[in-house]
């Protein structure tokens, strides 16, 4: 089967998208990340086997660019006829169109897919890197049967599924703690019927007793109902009292608070009259703080200016007159020239340092790369390669010699066997002839001794004797003519002369310094010596090249150091000339000259700044004095402690005003709340004698007592409610029992039902025993098959894995525990080490699992159908050599299977294209979907 075309109406980032002409044996789909490769993989699986809904953990891929959620796939069967599978998320079933245009069923699609289900297709034929990374996806039942027990039940069938079906049927019949199983349900119903039968038989004897019990129960029900009504009335009263208790307590608290607030109302009124002045000063408080902070900043700035000015004069030194330096004419041209000289000097020093470091490194490299000639330097590379070619020829000749010896031994054994077979029939023929001759003689003797009256019988005996003798003679003659052919078979035409082969082996062995008939171990030793000599030659050539390169680098670095030193000296001379023209009068480096000119410029700037800061300080001092005078006057009027600071006195005045305003507002609020509480209490308790009784109880009793009584009453209510319900149930049961006792035929009906249930239970248990035995036999057969045989898929996977790893791993082993519950894969290395697949590196494990999938695809094609392989970036974790080998294995699989390889790496697309000549390349554009 092959995929010919895709049509996506809406799926993920795809909308109205088609991918045609895919029926080539090998197609590489190349696209960057987020181009939709994994989305295409999920679309293929969804159309063939059904899309997942939002409840499943699989990707849902809602249409991001519109279109109906789904699409269609065009398939080609083994005869080249076209099938169409169209499926959408909002549809219950797929629409399958056969080659003749008629609608087909899901069963037809399943046959086209060789019976593969979603799990098998997702694990073996259409997978990405996440499925490839572990063995878990290959351990599902359908896939595991192919790996461990392929062929036990035949193509398209699962031994594990058969066992599960038997277990399901057993569980449907009988299962511990499974009430819906058939036998469990029958047993439970039989027990119920037996209990009901016993009760029905005793019922006729209880009528009078049940009638008296019903009367007593009805009286108890009436008393329990009265008691329950009384407790519910008291519960209602307690709920009202507990609801009003907090309001009464709140009323008492508010009255006490209102009495305290009325005491200082006169003082509060006086404060509130001048509250405007206090609030005005409070609003100016932040500005006053800002003025104080600003004054501190200005004072600090002035102090800093003075210190910086002193530092500038100190840096200029005692040789510079401060008054003259402040007025010195140092223009922008001089500073720019000094800055340029300093910049270039720094660059030259940095470059000089770098050149010196480069020179030092070059010297160290030259010393390290110095070549020391060894006692036996390796041969030239050409001579080593010639010796390696001779060794390969010697290996081939030695293998041919061993093959000829084996052929001669086999021919000799066959000749001896043929001679033995020829002699055995001869001995059997001779013995038969002797026996027949003896029988003929006996018959003739009997005929001669018979009486005369028995003449006809005697003649018949003589005739039989003669016939037996003739048969014996014929057997002897046949044996005499037969001649065995014991000679050895003639040698085949064109066979290699053993002597000439031995001469060629000896000549090549002598040229390599080996014995005339070298053993395999000696050949391997010679190969290792040649490899060591080749590596030594390569190392020597590399060190010679490094030494020459280091010497050239050292000469270039020395020239660069000399040039940088000369350039730096020229900059020093220009700096000295500029310093002399600026009146500094001393020798300066270019960096020092730049700094000196900058100091002269800063000195003039600091003098101007000092004058501006002094004027601002004078203005701030006047504003501060005015604010502090007004605060002092108000503080004296309201008795604020004069020892407090300015901010503390203002804060005290503001606090007194705010407190007075708060107390006034609180008095009004308390009055309103008291009025509201009085109205709420009157509405809650009502009017009349009952209301007065509740008000008196509320005044007398504490809230805790009421809550204790309510808790006790809750328990009593629950107990009374339960007792009343139990009595009602008893009364209903008693009435029903009496009604049933008046005219019941329950006994005969229950006896018939019991007999029927017993017969059904026996049949179910016999069926359960048969299923249990069948399941046990199938599991035992499956376990023995997995222990004694390795299926074809494992052998094929081992061949692929050996080729991909260049012989590093020689065998793949399917492993399972003795109980069959835990299974896994192991590999056998060339050194004989047995390694679990979980202990391999990620790349090697992915190579193993990919080989297993290719082998599984081949096995499935042999037993069922050759399905397409869809691979999503499965080579990204492989090194170049193994990636190339795996690409070759995939290309070989494309001879029998259609292969669609998705990748975002151009080099992998190129690698796959080289492995599969004629492969088609399809580029995905993420913006054109």
Image (cartoon, rainbow, N blue to C red):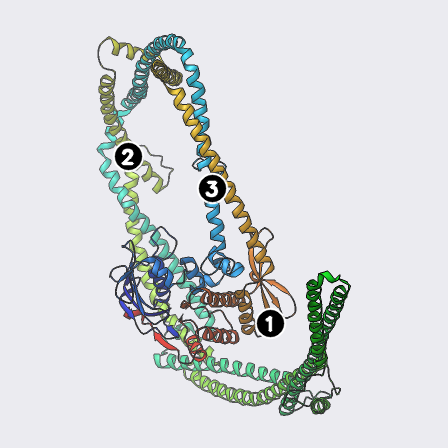
Residue 677: image x %, image y %?
25, 21
Using residue 387 as the reference point, say whether residue 15 is left or right of it.
Answer: left
- Neighbor class of circle 1 (other Cα within 10 Å; few <14, some 14-19, many 20+) is some
Do the residues bearing badges 1 and 3 touch, measured as CB atoms within 8 Å? no
Determine whether the residue tagged by mark 3 lies in a helix, strand or loop.
helix
Q: Quadrant of residue 382?
A: bottom right
Q: Is residue 395 visible?
A: yes
Using residue 897 as the reference point, say whether residue 522 is left or right of it.
Answer: right
Determine whether the residue tagged by mark 1 lies in a helix, strand or loop.
loop
**Residue on which disc 1 sits:** 808
Q: Quadrant of residue 124?
A: bottom left
Choose between 212 and 18: the one closer to the eye. Answer: 212
Using residue 433 as the reference point, say whether residue 829 is left or right of it.
Answer: left
**Residue on which disc 2 sits:** 658
Residue 620: numbered disc: none
**Residue on which disc 3 sits:** 171
Which label sits in the foreground, 3 or 2? 3
Q: Earlier in the sequence, mark 3 or mark 2?
A: 3
Determine whether the residue tagged by mark 2 lies in a helix, strand or loop.
helix
Q: Quadrant of the N terminus?
A: bottom left
Choose between 180 and 318: the one closer to the eye. Answer: 180
Residue 422: image x %, image y %?
70, 76
- Neighbor class of circle 2 (other Cα within 10 Å; few <14, some 14-19, many 20+) is some
């Amino acid at each position: 089967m092959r995929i010919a075309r895709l049509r996506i109406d809406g799926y993920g980032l795809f909308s109205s998208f088609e991918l045609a002409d895919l029926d080539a044996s090998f197609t590489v789909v190349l696209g960057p990340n987020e181009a939709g490769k994994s989305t295409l993989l999920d679309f293929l699986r969804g159309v063939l086997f059904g899309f997942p809904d939002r409840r499943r953990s699989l990707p849902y891929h809602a249409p991001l660019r519109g279109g109906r959620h789904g699409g269609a796939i065009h398939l080609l069967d083994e005869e080249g006829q076209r099938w169409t599978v169209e499926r959408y998320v909002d549809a219950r079933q797929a629409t399958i169109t056969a080659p003749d245009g008629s609608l087909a069923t899901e069963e037809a699609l399943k046959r086209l897919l060789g019976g593969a289900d979603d799990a098998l297709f997702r694990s073996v034929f259409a997978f990405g890197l996440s499925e490839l990374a572990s063995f878990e996806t290959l351990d599902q039942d359908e896939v595991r049967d192919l790996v461990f027990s392929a062929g036990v039940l035949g193509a398209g069938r699962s031994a594990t599924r058969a066992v599960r079906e038997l277990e399901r049927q057993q569980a449907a019949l009988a299962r511990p703690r499974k009430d819906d199983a058939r036998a469990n349900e029958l047993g439970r119903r039989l027990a119920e019927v037996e209990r009901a039968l016993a009760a029905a038989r005793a019922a006729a004897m209880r009528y009078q007793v049940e009638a008296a019990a019903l009367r007593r129960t009805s009286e108890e029900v009436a008393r329990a109902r009265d008691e329950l009504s009384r407790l519910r009335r008291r519960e209602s009263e307690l709920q009202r009292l507990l609801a009003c208790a907090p309001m009464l307590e709140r009323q008492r608290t508010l009255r006490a608070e209102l009495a305290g607030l009325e005491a200082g109302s006169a003082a509060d009124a006086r404060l509130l009259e001048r509250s405007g002045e206090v609030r005005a000063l409070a609003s100016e408080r932040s500005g006053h703080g800002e003025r104080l902070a600003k004054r501190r900043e200005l004072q600090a700035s002035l102090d800093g200016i003075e210190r910086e000015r002193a530092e500038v004069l100190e840096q200029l030194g005692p040789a510079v007159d401060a008054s003259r330096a402040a007025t010195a004419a140092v223009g922008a041209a001089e500073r720019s020239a000094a800055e340029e000289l300093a910049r270039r000097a720094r660059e030259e020093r940095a470059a000089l340092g770098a050149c010196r470091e480069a020179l030092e490194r070059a010297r160290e490299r030259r010393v390290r790369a110095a070549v020391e000639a060894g006692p036996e330097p390796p041969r030239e590379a050409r001579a080593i390669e010639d010796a390696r070619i001779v060794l390969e020829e010697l290996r081939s000749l030695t293998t041919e010699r061993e093959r000829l010896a084996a052929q001669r031994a086999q021919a000799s054994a066959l000749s001896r066997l043929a001679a033995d077979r020829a002699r055995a029939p001869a001995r059997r023929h001779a013995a038969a002839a002797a026996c027949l001759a003896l029988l003929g003689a006996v018959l003739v003797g009997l005929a001669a001794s018979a009486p005369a009256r028995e003449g006809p019988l005697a003649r018949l005996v003589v005739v039989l004797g003669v016939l037996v003798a003739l048969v014996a003679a014929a057997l002897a003659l046949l044996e005499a003519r037969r001649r065995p052919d014991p000679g050895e078979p003639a040698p085949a035409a064109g066979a290699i002369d053993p002597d000439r082969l031995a001469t060629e082996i000896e000549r090549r062995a002598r040229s390599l310094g080996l014995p005339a008939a070298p053993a395999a171990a000696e050949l391997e030793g010679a190969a290792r010596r040649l490899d060591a000599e080749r590596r030594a030659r390569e190392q020597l050539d590399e060190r010679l090249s490094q030494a020459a390169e280091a010497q050239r680098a050292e000469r270039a670095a020395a020239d660069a150091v000399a040039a940088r030193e000369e350039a730096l000296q020229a900059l020093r001379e220009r700096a000295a000339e500029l310093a002399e023209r600026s009146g500094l009068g001393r020798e300066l480096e270019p960096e020092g000259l730049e700094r000196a000119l900058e100091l002269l410029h800063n000195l003039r700037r600091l003098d101007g700044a000092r004058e501006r800061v002094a004027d601002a300080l004078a203005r701030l001092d006047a504003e501060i004095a005015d604010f502090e005078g007004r605060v002092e006057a108000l503080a004296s009027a309201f008795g604020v402690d004069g020892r407090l600071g300015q901010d503390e006195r203002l804060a005290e005045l503001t606090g007194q005003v705010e407190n007075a305003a708060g107390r006034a507002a609180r008095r009004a609020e308390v009055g309103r709340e008291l009025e509201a509480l009085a109205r709420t209490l009157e509405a809650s308790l009502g009017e009349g004698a009952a209301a007065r009784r509740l008000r008196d109880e509320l005044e007398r009793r504490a809230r805790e007592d009421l809550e204790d009584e309510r808790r006790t009453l809750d328990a009593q209510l629950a107990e009374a409610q339960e007792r009343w319900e139990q009595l009602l149930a008893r009364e209903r049961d008693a009435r029903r029992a009496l009604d049933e006792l008046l005219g019941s035929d329950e006994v005969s009906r229950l006896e018939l039902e019991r007999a029927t249930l017993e017969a059904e239970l026996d049949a179910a248990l016999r069926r359960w025993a048969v299923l249990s035995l069948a399941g046990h036999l199938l599991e035992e057969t499956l376990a023995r098959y997995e222990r004694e045989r390795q299926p074809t898929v494992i052998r094929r996977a081992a061949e692929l894995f050996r080729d991909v790893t260049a012989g590093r791993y020689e065998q793949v082993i399917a492993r399972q525990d003795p109980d069959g519950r835990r299974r896994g894969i192991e590999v056998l290395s060339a050194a004989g080490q047995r390694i679990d697949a979980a202990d391999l590196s990620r790349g090697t494990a992915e190579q193993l699992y990919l080989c297993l999938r290719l082998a599984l695809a081949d096995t499935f094609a042999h037993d069922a159908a050759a399905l397409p392989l869809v691979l999503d970036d499965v080579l990204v974790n492989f090194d170049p050599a193994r990636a190339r080998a795996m690409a070759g294995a995939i290309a070989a699989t494309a001879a029998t299977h259609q292969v669609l390889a998705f990748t975002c790496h151009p080099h992998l697309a190129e690698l796959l294209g080289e492995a599969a000549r004629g492969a088609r390349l399809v580029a995905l554009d993420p913006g054109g979907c």
